[in-house]
Image (cartoon, rainbow, N blue to C red):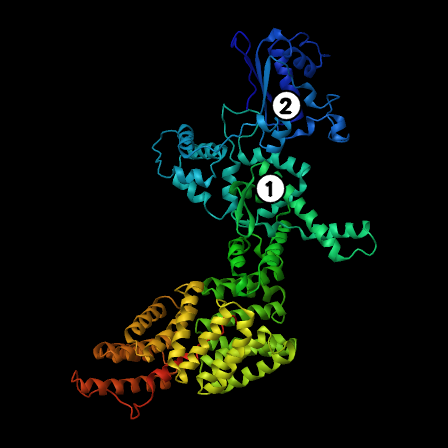
Amino acid sequence: MEFAYRTKELLPESSILWVSASTRQRFEQDYITIAKGLKLPGYNDPETHYLSLVKQSLEKPELGKWIMIIDNADDLSFFRTNKDQGGGANNISNCEHGFFEYIPGGPYGLVLYTTRNKVDALQLAGEEKIIQVTEMDDESLKSLLRSKIGSESQQEDDWLDLIRSLQRVPLAIVQAASFIRQKSWPVSKYLRYFGEKNEDISTKFLLHDFKDKTRDKTVSNSIFKTWMITVQQLEAQHPRAADLLWMMAFVNHQSIPRSLLIDRSFIQKTFDEHTSKAAPNLGEEEATPKARLAMEYDLDEAIGVLRAYSFINILSTKQGEDYAIHRLVQLFSRYWLKDHRQTFLIWESRMLAAVLREFPKKEYENWTKCAQLLPHVQGFVDSPYVSMLPALDLGSLLTVVSTYLRMKGQFFLAEEYINLAIKRLDKDLGQDDAATLEAKGCLALIWRDTDRLDEAERLLRFLIKTSIEVVGKEDLATTQINMNLGSVLRRQKKYDEAISLSRKCVSEFEKQKGPESTRTIESKMSLATTLGGTGQQAEALQLQKQVAKVLERRYDEDHPRLLTLQHDLAVTLNLVGSVKEALALSQHVFSRTLEIYGPEHPRTANIEFNLALSLDNEGKHEQAERHFRRVLNYRQQVHVGDNLNTIQCLRCLAICLQHQGQYENARYYMDLALEKISADPTDVDNMRWKINVDLARLEGEAARGQLWGTNLRTITDPTVSVATYAAASYAGSASCVMS
């Protein structure tokens, strides 16, 4: 703000004296101005020490009451004495002591400091004397905007959006109002450009300088230029806090997990210090807790500094502390690193490595943390330097994120991320690199789960060939790809090859990882599902019960891996005629799956379909119909592809309606199924045969009910158990959820 003062003639009650503490030079110059304005004794003498003159004069009664406002006291280094500073480059050039020595005291006046930093405020005035300036409310900010933007046909509908976009910062709002008025823009146009991902445009708006008679004429009115002084002080006095600010610039500005900000190099450095200073035999077990405690203290101290500057807020969560950074501060940080430090890519790469380090692998237990970290991934995809980020880190992060999204049923975003990963890894590391092969394997599973089975099969066969050439036929990576191919072949009804592959995978995983390893268990579950779909229910049931003992011992009852096994077991029980047991198991699995995955996940639809079959087998046809219709709605409106399973759902719904005597409705869904077969000839012969069997049965019942004539197409063997082969057909599409 501009320096101002009042003499006793203008304001007899008190003099108001304004001193800027933004720089040493401004502080001294304002003292000189006070001395001359008040015509203090000796003010014309060039030998006068103005700092001492002003202090001594204000502590005498002759000048009466006064208030001194020391504005922008954000750098206390030049307030301290030489002794406090320890000498060196920070010493004050124009006085022997720190400026604290020249702050007037006594009974005649009052000193008021303004500062952005609460820590500085505590040192300047003490806790009981701090006045916290609170955030302006919406109406006050709208009033400020109205006073600055003028009344030239501006609509106020968008004003609140502008205030929120600018994070309620008064200077930013006044700056925006100046820009809008100069350009004669409506607020909506400003918001349109400011809301774009193009940071150059947003930065241009926030660098806009303007005239404001209420502010210090020597200080820029641009909010970014105003913050430059603060950031320079932060870098000089609190480098660790500045580091945190730069790291926070590259993730979502809300809910930043504490774990992302931990400096692993600091742990190692502290560990090295402990091992060198402590006893020679000090081991890692003893040193690590000390290093971790030092690291936590270092982080908390830096967080405290950023909070003191009001750059961040702390958010309490069940997992601990998260942080939110002011969006404009984040935008400024990116601008500062790019245009002033040329270290944008260095810090972005460092934060990318931190997110990769913290993003957990595919296990269900980690899904909460995955969901927490997911919003922080998109920034790297949208980065202007995405092509320059480390290929391995970026590709690996997008691969693990894509795997998580696939398991959550978000196939579109999962495929978008994995395609970006493959493009980058192929280009920089080559198609034979392990990370590239892993990413392409992830893409094949997305294609499998969205029923692009032929594409998935071709890609997996290519990956097997490449993996054998790179790491060998018996490597676990090759075996995993073989297992995934087996699950695709099962869905394609290529049972002989699927069973052969699955048996080899079980044998290889048992040999290398043990009989109860996760990979061995998953391969046994996959084999059992394939066996069940080919009429080998006895072996399938034996395998599933063997696996169940391991999973029940290892996981709680709601774990998806156990629920998957129970779902597959229910299918097998249906096939062997244990209808009541299958129904009870299906109801339990469906209720738990609905809570875990939600109603619009393909896993939920698979399990609900099996539940409907169990209900229909048990004679609970109305309940079965409701579930069949929900699955059909999902198949038709939500799920990508999957025409064959949609046809199967139509067919089973028709059979369920037939069981209730609704022959016309049943015939409608049978005809609809045949139409879909004509549109997509996948597995035509097998499915058409089954539907014609259904039509023959329907014709017989309808004829007996005298609802229509005998003009339906028939096959000569209508005696097949419809519910049994419906379950068998659908069992072929079941898959291990964690694969």
**In the displayed image of the protein, which residue is found farthest to the right?**
280
Tell me, yes or no, if residue 442 can be seen here. yes
Residue visible at 51% across and 63% down? Answer: 404
| Residue 52, quarter of the rendered image | top right
- Picture layout, residue 456 above or below residue 221: below
- Picture layout, residue 717 above or below residue 458: below
Quadrant housing the N terminus? top right
Of residues 500 and 444, which is closer to you in this image? 500
Element type where label 1 sits in the image: helix
Side (left or right) of 619 relative to 303? left
In the rendering, at what x and y percent does residue 412 appear?
45, 64
Side (left or right) of 364 relative to 688? right
Of residues 660 and 646, which is closer to you in this image? 660
Residue placed under numbered mark 2 in the picture? 26
In the rendering, at what x and y percent does residue 262 appear?
64, 50
- Picture layout, residue 483 above or below residue 130: below
| Residue 102, quarter of the rendered image | top right
Element type where label 2 sits in the image: helix
Residue placed under numbered mark 1 in the picture? 336
Residue visible at 26% across and 89% down? Answer: 714
Q: CA distance from mark 2 to mark 1?
A: 25 Å
Q: Residues within 10 Å of mark 2 (few under 14, many from 20)?
A: some
Amino acid type for the residue under numbered disc 1:
Trp
Residue visible at 63% across and 79% down? Answer: 468
Sequence order check, earlier mark of 2 and 1: 2
Q: Residues within 10 Å of mark 1 (few under 14, many from 20)?
A: some
Side (left or right) of 341 relative to 373? right
In the rendering, at what x and y percent does residue 427 appear?
60, 65
Amino acid type for the residue under numbered disc 2:
Arg
